[in-house]
Amino acid sequence: MTDDAPIPGTLHVQNVRVDVLLSEETIAARVAELAAEIDRDYAGRTPVLCGVLTGAAIFMADLVRQMRNPVELDFIAVGSYGSATHSSGVVRLLKDLNAEVTGRDLIIVEDIVDSGLTLAYLRDLLAARYPASLATCALLDKAERRETDVPIEYVGFTIPNAFVVGYGLDYAGLYRQLSYVGVLHLDET
Ligand code: IMP
Ligand code: MG
């Protein structure tokens, strides 16, 4: 340990600071509530949870471990052209689901909905396969940034318009491992 040791609850890398927005405990409590809500709404059915890689992997892992109904897990990966902090809205499919989903109850599991363009693309893509039902569960909703009207049936937290990392969310591929969600500040010391 040196004088440069990080302040507890924050992460210091070069000129980057991450301030805690949602603590590990706060997230865990809300994830348990979402799991209970989905269990209740899908009682007697076996939904397929479609995690959107890579950001939703950690949320998905915690969510399903709080669920008591039978569920199946699958993953889909999409990319959007753009900078590290702003997507262009042009989405492309990088990895499709493994499962056949026609006639199944599908739940898209997303880390965050920002402009909504990624989610709108995913909903259109999956709706075209005639699932029995289609819903979305997003941990975070940056509602004020929405550019397209897309439904989100389950929202963990509505958050302000800031760039957040942690609990699966990245900045340039980093910070996904943080157990909390924090606001990223660049070029500050
Ligand atoms: P949208 O298409 O604008 O809704 O963006 C959705 C995707 O952009 C998310 O799935 C994230 O991968 C990424 N994204 C949007 N906002 C943030 C953020 O604050 N931190 C990290 N990734 C974000
Ligand atoms: Mg994502």
Image: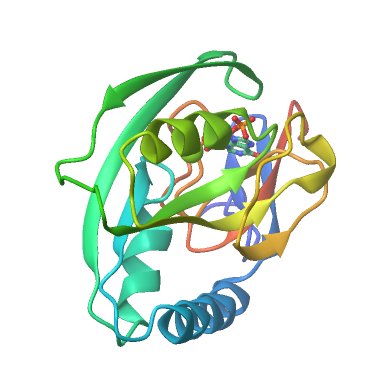
Vertical relation: 133 (above or below) 102 = below
User: Relative to the observer, which residue lies in front, 132 or 23?
Assistant: 132
The residue positioned 73% from the left and 31% from the top of the image is: 148
**59 in relation to 26, above or below:** above
Residue at image position (37%, 82%) is: 66
Q: Position of residue 29 (x, y in %)?
A: 56, 83
Instruction: Please say which color scheme the image uses.
Output: rainbow
Q: Eyeballing the image, is 15 above or below 127? A: above
* Quarter of the rendering occupied by the C terminus: top right
**Residue at horizontal 55%, vertical 72%?**
24
Q: Is residue 150 left or right of residue 118?
A: right
Q: How many marks?
A: 0
Between 56 and 24, the one lying in front of the other is 56
Q: Toward which corner of the image does residue 86 lie, by quadrant? A: top right
Where is residue 11? Give x, y as percent: 58, 50
Q: Quadrant of residue 8?
A: bottom right
Residue 97 coordinates in the image, percent (x, y): 22, 39
Q: Residue at x 35, y 50 (%)?
A: 51
Place of residue 63 in the rendered image (x, y in percent of width and height, measured from the top left): 40, 71
Q: Toward which corner of the image does residue 164 lie, by quadrant? A: top right
